[in-house]
Image: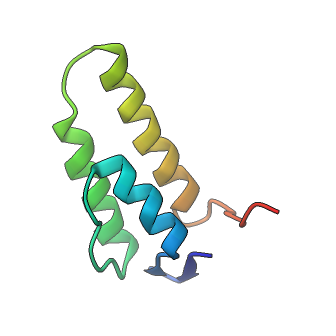
Amino acid sequence: MTIRFGNQVRLASRDRFRLMLLIERDPGHIVSFAELQALMQRHRAQVRGVSRDAEFLRWLMDREWNRLAPGSGYREPL
């Protein structure tokens, strides 16, 4: 499970893997939500166009950010 404390974050291996699939590379050593947000914004900006595939990728990135963002109430699925 991803551990959060204030603005600090430690991504769980499962969440790191989900991000790796989404951005097609290891997200690296993320220690804060600011770093996580910068990573997501950088990769979201690289997905250009109005195709259905581009829209879907942007939606997936938004979904992951909303799931991991501070105050999201994220809980590991049962």
Q: Quadrant of residue 26?
A: bottom left
As displayed, is residue 36 above or below residue 4? above
As displayed, is residue 17 above or below residue 43? below
Q: 35 or 60, which lies in front?
A: 60
Residue 1 picture location, percent across and down = 62, 76
At a point 27% along the width and 51% down the height, the residue shown is 24
Residue 40 picture location, percent across and down = 31, 53
Residue 16 picture location, percent across and down = 43, 67
At a point 37% along the width and 33% down the height, the residue shown is 57
Residue 55 picture location, percent across and down = 36, 23
Q: 7 or 2, which lies in front?
A: 2
As displayed, is residue 22 above or below residue 75? above
Quadrant where the image shows the C terminus: bottom right
Left or right, 21 with respect to 66, comes to left
Residue placed furthest toward the top = 51
At a point 44% along the width and 33% down the height, the residue shown is 59
